[in-house]
């Protein structure tokens, strides 16, 4: 085909009279011109007909010569797009500047990616401008090189660079990755293939708003977390914005996937995730989030919905997702989530998250503020660790204890790397894991107990003051109640030698003694002609505190036949009651001072009498009332205790 001269399109390149793009030849001319250094800033292009591409497409613009103009697809379709890696940025437009606008364009085609530190997108490889009202439909195939390098594949754009904008776009993609086990390249790598339903990377101050994507794919071919997939973006940077987007599709994977953002440090709001996820967890990580993605503490996800389904392993278990429901698998101790913190903007109400923790894996809370979870499900071996800066609010903590023989082998019967240790939940309940020490012949722990705290002592009452009548003594302060013993699940495994007795219990805290009543004040002395004052009443003794109730204990026990525990001692008594405070002493009576007595003779009766001036002798003070005895502490309700033992034969089978 004979090449046209540059700028031979119909039109003037003005907004009211744009350059007209009619066919593949016109598009190729534009690509050649931009590659030669003409970026078309402030120029306008408009597609006038559907265009079918017949050759591998090199892309319009590169990192060195970015397209800077305005390109209006006018609702027409560009089909047959096949991308090659001529430049680092691969797309219908390879790279655009901050002044570029790509709008109203419909694109169909395929991408064959060989990960080599490059950006791939159907509309734009590397977007620094605006993409709006575009639709992309693609088949994406990713070929594994040896070794794997970082690669960024987005259905609309490979990367949404700082300050750029993607709005009201639609996309559908079928994604396939070379099977690692077939290619012989199953390997651990610190490189990543980032796949996003809109853009692989959404960088600082970049925005993705109002987009709808359907992403179907099998990402199970690479082990060890080499593939990171997000329904909207694989990675949302700090200050990046993802808002009012919808994701659907069916994804199969081995390691990790997120409904909206694989890693989120920005803001995710008003988004809906309706995907179905089939997971084959064989890698070191297994983290699925239907809502806002992994949150580093800088990001925020709110007003989200995740109505899809999760299919685990063989597909036997299907669980409906809730708002940003999070599942954590595997043995990786560093898995963390500081959220998602789901808060309705402008409202005080909180959306809380369901968390499932399975297979001896921790959820480590490292937030600087509050983290809210509606329900936390702990399977045997799951536990939570919270740092000093975090506040964890759990509405309900559930124990998942119904598991089959295969799950028992996986979850309980394995070796610990660090020997005997305790793990406990800080919050509503306690989890204790006792593991046989690998370096010693004997287990390093033979006793495990949790208990409620003891109540504080009641203070003594103050003495009443002296006066005309003595003041009453103040009552002693009541002793505080002991705390209830917490419920506990205790997991024991990997024993090497027998233990005669293992003491396990959850005792209630003791109630504390009531304070003594204060003494009554002394009565004042009488003066002429009055009587002496009454003594004050003694103060009542304080009540003793109630003992706390004992907690419930459940023990899961897995060991070999030659290392059995011969006897479990499972006491969960209630705390002892506090003693009653003593009564306050009665105040002393006042006395009558300076009596003057005179004698008189009655001549008529011939008798003598004695008259005392100053009144009668003082009355004794009233005795102080005895302090009431402290109420005895309620006996701890006998906690329900159970021991389930699994004693496999050699090889881990019964």
Image: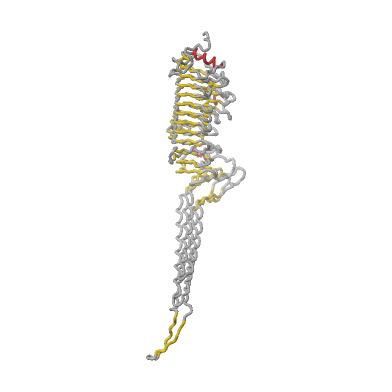
Q: Position of residue 634 (x, y in %)?
A: 45, 57
In front of the other: 69 or 643: 69
Asked if residue 218 shows in the view, the reply is: no
- In this rendering, would 375 be left or right of 66? left
| Count of numbered circles in the view | 0
Q: Position of residue 183 (x, y in %)?
A: 56, 23
Asked if residue 242 shows in the view, the reply is: yes
Q: Position of residue 610 (x, y in %)?
A: 43, 85
Residue ranking furthest to the left: 604
In front of the other: 594 or 455: 594
Instruction: Please name the residue shown 53% across and 36% down the image.
Output: 296
In front of the other: 254 or 271: 271
Q: Where 491 sits versus 71, above or below?
A: below
Q: Which colour style is shown?
A: secondary structure
Residue ranking furthest to the top: 2
Q: Quadrant of residue 249?
A: top left
Q: Where 188 sits versus 583, above or below?
A: above
Q: Position of residue 96 (x, y in %)?
A: 53, 22
């Amino acid at each position: 085909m004979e090449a046209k001269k540059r700028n031979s399109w119909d039109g003037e390149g003005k907004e009211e009279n744009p350059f007209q793009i009619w066919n593949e030849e016109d598009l190729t001319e534009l690509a050649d011109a931009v590659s030669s250094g003409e970026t078309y800033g402030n120029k306008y292009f408009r597609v006038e007909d559907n265009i079918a591409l017949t050759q591998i497409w090199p892309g319009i613009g590169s990192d060195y010569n970015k397209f800077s103009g305005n390109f209006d697809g006018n609702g027409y379709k560009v089909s047959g797009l096949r991308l090659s890696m001529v430049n680092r940025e691969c797309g219908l437009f390879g790279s655009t500047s901050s002044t570029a606008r790509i709008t109203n364009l419909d694109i169909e085609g395929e991408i064959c990616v060989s990960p080599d530190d490059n950006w791939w997108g159907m509309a734009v490889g590397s977007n620094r401008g605006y993409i709006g009202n575009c639709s992309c439909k693609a088949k994406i195939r990713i070929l594994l090189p040896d070794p794997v390098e970082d690669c960024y594949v987005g259905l609309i754009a490979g990367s949404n660079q700082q300050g750029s904008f993607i709005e009201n776009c639609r996309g559908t993609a079928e994604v396939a990755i070379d099977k690692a086990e077939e290619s012989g390249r199953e390997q651990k790598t610190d490189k990543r293939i980032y796949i996003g339903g809109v853009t692989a990377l959404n960088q600082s101050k970049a925005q993705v708003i109002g987009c709808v994507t359907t992403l179907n794919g099998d990402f199970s071919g690479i082990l060890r977390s080499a593939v990171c997939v997000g329904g909207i973006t694989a990675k949302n940077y700090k200050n990046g914005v993802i808002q009012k987007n919808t994701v659907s599709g069916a994804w199969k994977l081995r390691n990790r996937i997120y409904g909206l953002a694989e890693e989120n440090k920005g803001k995710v709001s008003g988004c809906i995730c309706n995907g179905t996820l089939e997971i084959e967890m064989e890698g070191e990580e297994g983290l699925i989030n239907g809502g806002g993605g992994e949150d580093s503490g800088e990001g925020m996800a709110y007003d989200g919905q995740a109505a899809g389904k999760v299919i685990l392993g063989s597909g036997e278990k299907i669980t409906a997702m809730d708002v940003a429901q999070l599942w954590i698998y595997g043995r990786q101790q560093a898995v963390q989530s500081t959220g998602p913190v789901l808060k309705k903007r402008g409202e005080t109400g909180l959306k809380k998250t369901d968390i499932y923790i399975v297979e001896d894996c921790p959820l480590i809370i490292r937030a600087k503020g509050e983290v809210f979870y509606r329900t936390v499900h702990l399977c045997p071996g799951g536990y939570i660790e919270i740092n000093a800066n975090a506040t964890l609010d759990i509405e309900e903590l559930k124990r998942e204890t119904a598991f089959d023989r295969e799950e028992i082998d996986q979850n309980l019967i394995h070796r610990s790397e660090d020997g005997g240790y305790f793990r406990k939940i800080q919050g509503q309940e306690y989890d204790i894991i006792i593991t046989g020490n690998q370096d010693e012949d004997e287990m390093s722990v033979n006793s495990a107990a949790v208990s409620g705290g003891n109540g504080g002592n009641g203070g003594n009452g103050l003495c009443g003051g002296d006066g005309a009548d003595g003041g009453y003594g103040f009552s002693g302060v009541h002793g505080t109640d002991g705390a209830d013993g917490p419920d506990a699940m205790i997991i024991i495994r990997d024993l090497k030698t027998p233990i005669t007795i293992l003491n396990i219990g959850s005792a209630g805290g003791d109630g504390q003694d009531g304070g003594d009543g204060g003494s009554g004040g002394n009565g004042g002395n009488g003066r002429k002609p009055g009587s002496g004052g009454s003594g004050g009443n003694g103060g009542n003794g304080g009540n003793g505190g109630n003992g706390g109730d004992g907690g419930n204990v459940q023990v899961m026990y897995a060991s070999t036949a030659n290392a059995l525990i011969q006897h479990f001692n499972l006491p969960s008594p209630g705390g002892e009651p506090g003693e009653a405070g003593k009564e306050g002493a009665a105040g002393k009576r006042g006395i009558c001072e300076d009596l003057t007595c005179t004698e008189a003779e009655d001549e008529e009766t011939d008798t003598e009498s004695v008259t005392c001036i100053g009144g009668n002798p003082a009355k004794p003070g009233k005795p102080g009332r005895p302090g009431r005895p402290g109420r005895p502490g309620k006996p701890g309700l006998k906690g329900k205790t159970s021991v389930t033992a699994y004693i496999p034969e050699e090889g881990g089978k019964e």
